């Protein structure tokens, strides 16, 4: 009986010690700061203006401000935008020409624009087929520590002599703060466009 009580007491003591250690370890972890959106925007603006010295400026910040910057640069949502450009010297024989850019842009929780992925499609048409076409794609970064890595996908069909020209492209962006923090987020947006021989147009992205 005494042995049972001793064993139970030993088990209880070990359990208490484990819970105490666990609680202490948790308490030592930095708690999530109460994020101040205005301060976050101001810090990001300062790092943007620092340009090449942004890494040094970030390293000089307090741990709380570094956490605030990291939060303010995280991708929160992505938007799509279509922009039609004026076409010069369009061929009369072609019937018509169009130039359209499809853009996917990412924003942070405080509205900071982070990156944009673009595809441009120019095509001329005669009412039924595509008579000429031009295509381009590029990535842009608008915030510190984000970088455009590379294009990672491409698929095209149709073109001159066909009823339409279709192009799908995908790129990769990465958020890397400093060597101590490392890379914390990656984005792989894609966009697609289709121009028709009738002059109609469709696009989308993800």
Image: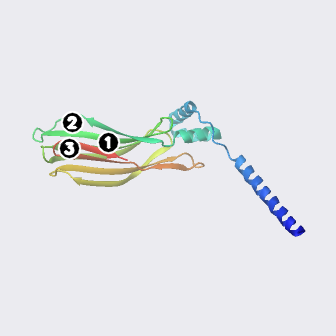
User: Front-most of 135 and 102?
Assistant: 102
Comparing labels 1 and 3, the label whose residue is closer to the camera: 1
The disc at residue 47 is none
Asked if labels 1 and 2 touch by Cβ distance under 8 angstroms, the answer is no
Q: Residues within 10 Å of mark 1 (few under 14, many from 20)?
A: many
The disc at residue 87 is 2
Left/right of residue 131 with respect to residue 183 in the rendered view: left
Q: Is residue 47 above or below residue 160?
A: above
Q: Which residue is mark 1?
A: 102
- Residue 88 falls in which quadrant of the image? top left
Q: Residues within 10 Å of mark 2 (few under 14, many from 20)?
A: some
Left/right of residue 190 with respect to residue 142 in the rendered view: left
User: Front-most of 135 and 72?
Assistant: 72
Q: Is residue 10 above or below residue 203?
A: below
Residue 170: where, in percent of width, then height?
Answer: 36, 51
Q: Which residue is mark 3?
A: 123
Q: Is residue 185 visible?
A: yes
Residue 191: where, in percent of width, then height?
Answer: 34, 47
Q: Is residue 121 visible?
A: no
User: Front-most of 124 and 129?
Assistant: 129
Residue 45: where, in percent of width, then height?
Answer: 52, 33
Which sits earlier in the primary sequence, circle 1 or circle 3? 1
Of the 4 image quadrants, the one containing the N terminus is: bottom right
Asked if labels 3 and 1 touch by Cβ distance under 8 angstroms, the answer is no
User: Front-most of 131 and 196?
Assistant: 196
Q: Residues within 10 Å of mark 3 (few under 14, many from 20)?
A: many
Q: Is residue 43 above or below residue 140?
A: above
Which sits earlier in the primary sequence, circle 2 or circle 1? 2
Furthest-right residue in this view: 2
Furthest-front residue in this view: 1
């Amino acid at each position: 009986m005494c042995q049972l009580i001793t064993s139970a007491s030993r088990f209880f003591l070990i359990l208490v010690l484990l819970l105490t250690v666990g609680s202490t370890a948790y308490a030592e972890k930095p708690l999530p700061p109460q994020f101040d959106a205005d301060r976050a925007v101001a810090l990001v603006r300062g790092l943007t203006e620092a340009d090449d010295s942004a890494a040094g400026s970030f390293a000089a910040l307090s741990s709380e401000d570094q956490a605030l910057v990291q939060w303010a640069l995280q991708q929160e949502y992505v938007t799509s935008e279509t922009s039609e450009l004026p076409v010069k010297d369009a061929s009369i024989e072609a019937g018509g020409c169009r130039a359209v850019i499809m853009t996917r842009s990412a924003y942070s929780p405080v509205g900071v624009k982070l990156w944009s992925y673009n595809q441009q499609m120019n095509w001329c048409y005669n009412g039924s087929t595509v008579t000429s076409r031009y295509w381009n794609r590029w990535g842009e970064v608008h915030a510190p520590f984000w970088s455009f890595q590379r294009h990672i996908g491409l698929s095209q069909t149709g073109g001159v002599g066909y009823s339409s020209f279709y192009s799908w492209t995908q790129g990769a962006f990465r958020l890397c703060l400093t060597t101590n923090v490392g890379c914390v987020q990656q984005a792989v947006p894609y966009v697609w466009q289709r121009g028709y021989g009738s002059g109609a147009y469709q696009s989308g992205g993800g």
